Image (cartoon, helix red, strand yellow):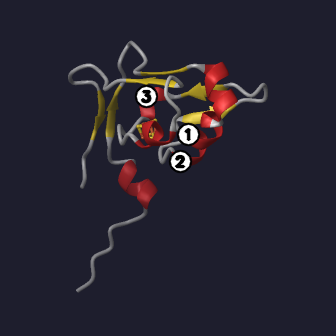
Amino acid sequence: MTFDPGSVNDRLSQNVFHTDAVPHIEINQELAKATGTSKRIVAVCPAHVYREEADGTISVEFAGCLECGTCLAVADPGTLRWVYPSGGMGVEYREG
Ligand code: SF4
């Protein structure tokens, strides 16, 4: 008997996201760009929350955040304001 857990994307699609009215992530664009944080957070976020725009700014699709904290681990101090979504909001894991 074998167990097929499915692809990562298939498993992530089982989650439910409750979108908070107030963004729980904000970027200090100038500092993030100057320190290299912009490139790092785009590269490490497993949910592709961050995207580098043509003008070099970083857009944030915070509604898809998995609340894993990886971006905070690679961000220089002062570049991100990241807090958990308010109670009952944010990701609701359905599996695992
Ligand atoms: S906490 Fe995780 S999922 Fe959310 S933005 Fe940061 S790296 Fe992406």
Q: Residue at x 53, y 33 (%)?
A: 76
Question: Residue 40: image x %, image y %?
Answer: 59, 42
In the picture, the quarter occupied by the C terminus is: bottom left
Q: Residues within 10 Å of mark 2 (few under 14, many from 20)?
A: some
Q: Residues within 10 Å of mark 3 (few under 14, many from 20)?
A: some
Residues marked 1 and 2 touching at CB (< 8 Å): yes
Q: Secondary structure at mark 1?
A: helix
Q: Residue at x 45, y 54 (%)?
A: 9
Tag 3: residue type?
Ala
Which corner quadrant of the figure contains ligand 1? top left
Given the current orientation, which residue lies at the most extreme bottom position? 1
Tag 1: residue type?
Ile
On the picture, is 50 further left or further right than 94?
right
Q: Nearer the viewer, mark 1 or mark 3?
A: 1
Tell which of 21 and 33 is nearer to you. Answer: 33
Q: Secondary structure at mark 3?
A: helix
On the picture, is 52 further left or further right than 92?
right
Q: Residue at x 47, y 39 (%)?
A: 71
Tag 2: residue type?
Val
Q: Which sits earlier in the primary sequence, circle 1 or circle 3?
A: 1
Residue 41 numbered tag: 1
- Asked if 77 appears above or below 40 in the picture, the reply is above
Q: Splitting the image into 4 quarters, where does residue 59 fall? A: top right
Q: Cβ of disc 1 within 8 Å of ligand 1?
A: yes
Dot 2 corresponds to which residue?
44
Q: Secondary structure at mark 2?
A: helix
